[in-house]
Image: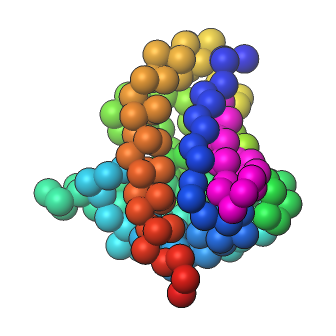
Amino acid sequence: MAEPLVITRVLHAPRELVFKVWSDVEHLNKWWGPTALTIDYAKLDFKPGGKFHDRMVSPEGDEMWGRFVFGEIIAPEKIVFVNSFSDKEGNAVRAAFNEAFPLEIENILTFEEHDGKTTLTLRGGPINATEAEQQFFLEMFDSMKQGFGGTFDQLETYLASIQGE
């Protein structure tokens, strides 16, 4: 099993709000994904066994489909989901950028509140992956940390924009 990717971010928002923006499609649409991409289609069934299915579009018009399949959900403490690239029907597909990228990544999000701030921790790693896929995942750590860093920057900005609503 590959070493997990671990990313932690302290967000200046209460835990219930941070959890809510992960569990409501109207919120996810506003901040989820790589920095330059926008979500133009999203469907969410937030329950164990449910899915988040989305299409992101680049400024050049390139599209990328993705999905989460939810496992354990403990509001407002924890969300477990398996993430993958997908086709427009929501089936898991290989990453277009490299066939060696694992088909499925299990992510465990935890939310801990201290003094009105939330520590969000993402711990993720490939499941049902070959040794080569696990190795490729390890080699992608810097890129994934940068990508999630941008996504979490967007999350932080979005949370600041909706506080007090």
Q: Inspect the magenta stretch and tell me whether residue 9 lies in it.
A: no
Q: Main secondary structure of the magenta part?
A: strand
Residue 106 percent location from the top left of the image? 69, 40
Looking at the rendering, the stretch of residues picked out in magenta corresponds to 109-125
Q: Residue at x 32, y 52 (%)?
A: 35
Q: Position of residue 123 (x, y in %)?
A: 67, 35
Residue at x 49% of width, y 78% of height: 162
In the picture, the quarter occupied by the N terminus is top right
**Left or right of residue 126: residue 145:** left
Residue 68: x and y in percent read 62, 55
> Where the C terminus falls, by quadrant?
bottom right
Q: Residue at x 53, y 17 (%)?
A: 138
Instruction: Indicate left or right for 18 with 140 as reference.
Output: right
Left or right of 127 on screen, residue 84: left
Q: Do we see residue 38 in this rendering?
A: yes
Against 9, residue 40 (above or below) is: below
Is 131 drawn above or below residue 117 in the view shown?
Answer: above
Q: Nearer the viewer, residue 80 or 162?
A: 162
Residue at the location (54% across, 65% down)?
53
Q: How is the image coloured?
A: rainbow
